[in-house]
Amino acid sequence: MQITTRTEYSVRALCELCFSENPISLKVLSKEHKLPFKYLEHLFRDLKNSGIVYSVAGSKGGYRLKRPAEEITLLDILRAVDKDPTIHKCLQTKDAEYCLGESCRFHIIWKKINVYIEEYYEKITLAGIIEEI
């Protein structure tokens, strides 16, 4: 369950939303953080569909957080933009060529590690990240 570029860019953009009392457009986020505009469009579609942000229409529109930053976890963000954020392909597809299946001794290890990491990421909130930066 690595932090991908999708997750990193999402966290950076969401932190910026935390600092503003007004909606922020993707154009502004793209320019100020040197993030690709089209990439942000895809990320924010996923973040919106996951209930993390909502859009505000109009000339002064943009995006806002849908929930307080204290309620948005790193795991929420990972799941929104990375879809299947498991640590090993073995956990994504049963009986794949790189997996020996449920009875594989390694499968249980990857599963335990994945649960541990998920629990850790669930403790990290957007508000906590804001405090650190």
Image (spheres, rainbow, N blue to C red):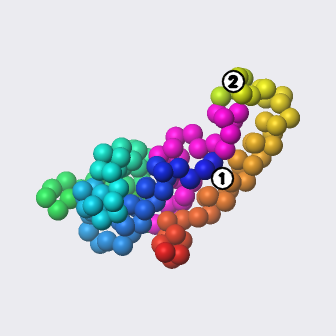
Q: Is residue 45 left or right of residue 93?
A: left
Q: Confirm whether the magenta stretch covers residue 63.
A: no
Q: Quadrant of residue 64?
A: bottom left
Instruction: Identify residue for label 2.
Output: 96
Residue extending farthest to the right is 105
What separation in Å lies between label 1 and label 2 (alpha carbons)? 23 Å
Taking depth in this image into account, of 83 and 37 the one nearest to the observer is 37
Circle 1/circle 2 CB separation < 8 Å: no
Query: Horizontally, is 16 left or right of 75 in the view?
Result: left
Residue 48 in the image: above or below residue 126: above
Residue 94 percent coordinates (x, y): 69, 26
Helix, strand or loop under label 2: loop
- Tell me which residue sits at (17%, 62%) in the image: 60
**Magenta region includes residue 86:** yes
The image shows residue 132, relative to residue 4, as above or below, that is below
> In this orientation, which residue lies closer to the viewer: 83 or 38?
38
